[in-house]
Amino acid sequence: AKERDVTNVDAVVIGAGFSGLYMLHCLRDRLGLDVRGFEAAGGVGGVWYYNRYPGARCDSDGFVYCYSWDSELLQEWEWGGKYPVQPELLRYLEHVADRHDLRRSFTFDTRVTSAVYDEAAARWTVTTDGGETLSTRYLVTGIGHLSIARYVPDLPGLSEFGGEWYHTGSWPHEPVDLRGKRIGVIGTGSSGVQCIPVVAEQAEHLTVFQRTPQFSIPARHETVDENFWRDVKANYDEIWAQAKVSASGFPWQHNGKRALEVSDEERRETYERLWLHGGVRFANGSFRDLVSDDEANRTVSEFLREKIREIVKDPVTAEKLVPRHPFLSRRPIVDTNYFETYNRDNVTLVDIRAEPIVTLTPAGVRTAEAEYPLDVLILATGFDAVTGPYFGIDVRGRDGLSLVDAWRDGPSGYLGLQTAGFPNLFTVTGPGSTLGNLPITIETHVEWITDCIAHLEANGIREMEADAAAEREWMRQVNEQAESSMISRADSWINGANIPGKQRAYVFYFGHFGYFRRLCAEVAADGYRGFVLR
Ligand code: NA7
């Protein structure tokens, strides 16, 4: 039968987002390998294929939210604003795919269902839901952390709800007409905060059901103009050089000072200036100890709480919107008119910790105190991060070890690149990797993996995997770093706490990106220290 035919290739790449597109290009066009790519979606784009909800944008400054490796494209491309919107991001990745002729190596609408390692042959057997079986030397995942495994909470009565409901992470391709409708949004993470102001402008009435208030920094799109782009294009080499040695992949540093070593006036002036600059730079461009020192952090958290009280006119609503957790204990959020939206007459904020949702009804949402009639419900309730995408594939390594068993106590990896027991499987930004500005984090991994595979090929090395002890030691450092940082002060998808019953674990390295990049390079130069090569 046709489905028994096995296609032999050198490498299989899973995913056609920022990671998979570049990975495929490197292996196919730089190393000359025979590579096949698979993508579950109908096209390229990864998270930017799926996240089409109103207001969807990236939270990294656009001029560095792109590939650094195509210098001609850097001169040609210009984003429409400071933070690109989803249609532009999708167009960009489609353009890259066309420009480098990547689509012909991908099979779309096709999910990799299993990957089983054959130790005797030192090859992976990969099967897809299209009925195809491949045998490959190398398997590389570019499946991201969030894209596919949307989290829909177990809301009582959801199936009885008479209106339409959508998850932000799987928004329909056809535009959804929200004009004149009564709309509810559950969730105020990055997705909720981006869509709420846009939805409010279209809705007859918007009701936001908030469980945890969030800090958010205004984007200030207006700070980017023609002059900005001229300067950026003239200085791209320097910009990338700075980003590569920076703390989180952006071309700037903190100011080198501790928050409490300067006067109250200087501190205030620093925060005000960055607040006016806007965006993620507020989070990582001021004092060096905001993320590590409670007292320092209190100064910035209080500054932001005051801003919310200044912006939101109704004091009762304002208090509901003021977060209790420290700034930077969750991923920073960037917004356009988020807090201002609560000054609109057609917007209601419901604090569901004080007034819990009891059930959905055919007509809307019933809380402990009231009934909120709705035509449309938007769930901006996040994702089963990391384990969601990885456990969606039945991965079996050496001795039949399943990835689910290997990661029973939480996802684990050595420098985010490989996991012990899974030879020749490489994970782009896998567990133990940095986060930060993701395109440059991704490039760091993709280029490392490319050089590594070139080394394996050139030296006739059959197998490579992370050494279990090196991996344990790296994950110990990942944990230690997280414990000493603000990220340990709150629950979120970052530590697995957003999914009821999920094993909590720190998956990402919250240390310095520049250090991480250097470490990856040193490890390779040192004969792949901490990896076993056979
Ligand atoms: P997030 O950041 O995980 O946010 C999910 C939101 O949904 C958050 O406000 C949650 O409240 C809320 N939530 C989750 N479950 C429930 C239930 N059962 N009831 C009410 N509210 C709930 O997901 P996003 O999509 O916004 O962003 C994910 C990442 O994508 C983001 O960090 C960027 O990297 C891009 P909670 O705060 O947990 O109380």
Image: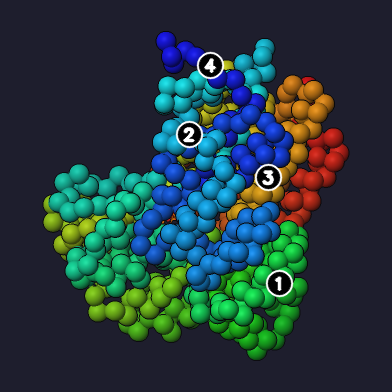
Q: Is residue 504 visible?
A: no
Residue corresponding to mark 1: 234
Asked if 372 appears above or below 32 in the picture, the reply is: below
SS at mark 1 in the image: helix
Work out whether residue 205 or residue 4 is closer to the camera in this orientation and state it: 4
* Quarter of the image with the C terminus in it: top right
Tell me the distance, in whole angstroms, between the alpha carbons under discs 3 and 1.
Answer: 27 Å
**Between disc 1 and disc 4, whose residue precedes?**
4
Counting from the top left corner in percent of width and height, residue 56 is at 42, 61
**Between disc 2 and disc 1, whose residue precedes?**
2
**Between disc 3 and disc 1, whose residue precedes?**
1
Tell me the distance, in whole angstroms, between the alpha carbons under discs 1 and 4.
Answer: 50 Å
Mark 4 surroundings within 10 Å by alpha-carbon count, few (fewer than 14), some (14 through 19), many (20 or more)? some
Query: In the displayed structure, does residue 351 sit left or right of residue 102?
Result: left
**Between disc 4 and disc 2, whose residue precedes?**
4
Q: Which mark is residue 107?
A: 2
Query: What amino acid does circle 3 point to?
Result: His
**Contact check, label 1 and label 4, Cβ < 8 Å:** no
Counting from the top left corner in percent of width and height, residue 472 is at 70, 36
Query: What amino acid does circle 1 point to?
Result: Ala
Tell me which residue sits at (61%, 31%) in the image.
Answer: 35
| Circle 3 or circle 1, nearest the eye | 1
| Circle 4 or circle 3, nearest the eye | 4
Query: In the displayed structure, does residue 347 sit left or right of residue 463?
Result: left
**Contact check, label 4 and label 2, Cβ < 8 Å:** no
| Circle 3 or circle 2, nearest the eye | 2
Q: Is residue 451 visible?
A: yes
Asked if 78 appears above or below 139 in the picture, the reply is: below
SS at mark 3 in the image: helix
**Between disc 3 and disc 2, whose residue precedes?**
2
Q: Which mark is residue 6?
A: 4
